[in-house]
Image (spheres, rainbow, N blue to C red):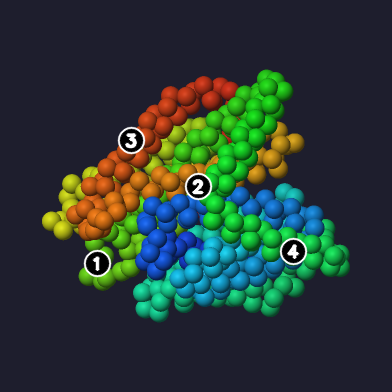
Amino acid sequence: MQQSLNVLKQPKPFYLIFFLELWERYGYYGLQAILAVYLVRELDISESESFIIFGAFNALVFGLVAIGGFLGDRVLGTKRTIVFGALVLMAGYAIMALAGNDIQMVYLALGTVAVGNGLFKANPSSLLAKCYKKGDSRLDGAFTMYYMAINIGSFISLLSVPYVVDHFGWSLGFMVSALGLFVALANYFIIRHWVADYGSEPDFKPLDYKKFGLVFVGVIAACFVSVFILNHLFIANVLLAMLGSSVVLIFLKEILGSKGVERGKMIVALVLMLEAVIFWVMYFQMPTSLNFFTIHNVEHFVFGFEINPISFQSLNPFWIMVASPILAYIYNRGGVTGKDMSMPAKFAMGMALTSVSFVLIPLAARFASAEGLVAPGWIVGTYLAQALGELLISGLGLAMVAQLVPERMHGFIMGAWFLTTSAASLLAGYVAGLTAVDAGQSATALVTLPIYSHFFEVMGVISAVVALIMFLTTPKLNRLMSPVEKSQEKLATGRLF
């Protein structure tokens, strides 16, 4: 009971950061919800190409996160970087709203959003951690609620933005994302005195205008570099492959230079990170191939009301919010009874649930109507299984990697984790492109149903095989990582970014 009260009773700075993150995520997921569909319907880009562009954009979003963390800690200060990042994000969404059918303006908007997200993303959680003294029992509850803000923001956005697009057009749909950032910043400036005593070292020094000028020029340059990358995706593939290979080689060198239990833990961390790449490729089918499946082949009436099929994406954060406290209880109960699953076993279970989420679709296809449409209940089940898999892999992954590698490598490994997400996002775009209808063939429900059914059946089988391998190797990984303190395993409520 006391623990529950501690979760709810937080210091004032927490509520400022909570709403800041909620509205920023509202903006980002609003863009993500409609981007691929916009590229197809308004710019007349093929579905396969739109998925690749979406994947490249997402890769930039995750690949630039570490830069904002560095600027917040060492250069501008955490709070200044938050504000600067939010302003850059607003500019990106505004450019997107004004882009119309100009693909280069769209690329500029996406590059600006990616850079703004890179500036912003790491800093609210960093500021939140600074608002609590060491050993404060409220910290775990604060981060649980903080991650809930992410899911609340994405849930509201994924429901409302498609509605805005339906009734008011694409431009206003993108502008809503900018309005979300405006609300976040307005709230911040009204009550910023709540965090006056918190921040990184540069926050408490006068702004160095020379440094800020250099950062500003660097941000402008990064936006246009991002445009160049989006125009030349082959270069993006090569750069990501080189960077990924370098990270793996550095990690292997550190493993070979370590001994005993430390080496075992690092081997487990590397294996789980590689497994996470496979999961993320599956996960990023939600805003691409799975989203288009709901558009083409899922009935759009729920309890007699017609809904925009894009809004089915809101089921993911909805199930995250429902399932998080249940899983937290199960974990805590397992810890008390000594029957909690190990981290490798949780990863394997997460992959198995991902397989279930995909296998439901070819199963649903067997019960499709004569028009090639399936009942919405099937997609609800798909998102439930996907959300549970996300909680078991994404929700635990970052904390898991941090606890398995030595402290000297924490910064490197955090960057490597986001790099796995970035690489998987790019790869996922190409994978999703396999669902595209052949040129010259009309995308009717009867045509697309067997394409999606076969695609998701293959994805489900691959996920199941990977899950089986993960279960079979779990005992070996458990021995390598022993003794791992199970009390350190935390449940983050789902979406971490």
- Percent coordinates x, y for residue 396 in the rendering: 54, 43
Q: Which is more N-terminal, label 1 or label 2?
A: 1
Q: Which is more N-terminal, label 4 or label 3?
A: 4
Which residue bears the numbered disc 2?
426
SS of the residue under disc 2: helix
Which residue bears the numbered disc 1?
301
Using the image, tell me which numbered label, if any, was put on residue 217: 4
Using the image, tell me which numbered label, if any, was put on residue 386: none
The three-letter amino acid code for the residue at tag 3 is Val
Q: Which is more N-terminal, label 2 or label 4?
A: 4
Work out how far the residue at label 1 is from the one at label 3, CA to CA, in angstroms. 30 Å
Work out how far the residue at label 1 is from the one at label 4, CA to CA, in angstroms. 49 Å
Q: Which is more toward the observer, 471 or 142?
A: 471
- The reply to whether residue 105 is visible in this rendering is yes
Q: Are marks 3 and 2 in contact (CB under 8 Å)?
A: no
Using the image, tell me which numbered label, if any, was put on residue 461: 3
Indicate which label's residue lies in the foreground, 1 or 4: 4
Q: Are marks 1 and 4 in contact (CB under 8 Å)?
A: no
SS of the residue under disc 1: strand
Indicate which label's residue lies in the foreground, 1 or 3: 3
Q: Residue at x 44, y 40 (%)?
A: 350
Query: On screen, 348 above or below 381?
Result: above
The three-letter amino acid code for the residue at tag 1 is Phe
In the rendered structure, the answer to whether residue 321 lies left or right of residue 368 reads right
The three-letter amino acid code for the residue at tag 4 is Val
The three-letter amino acid code for the residue at tag 2 is Leu
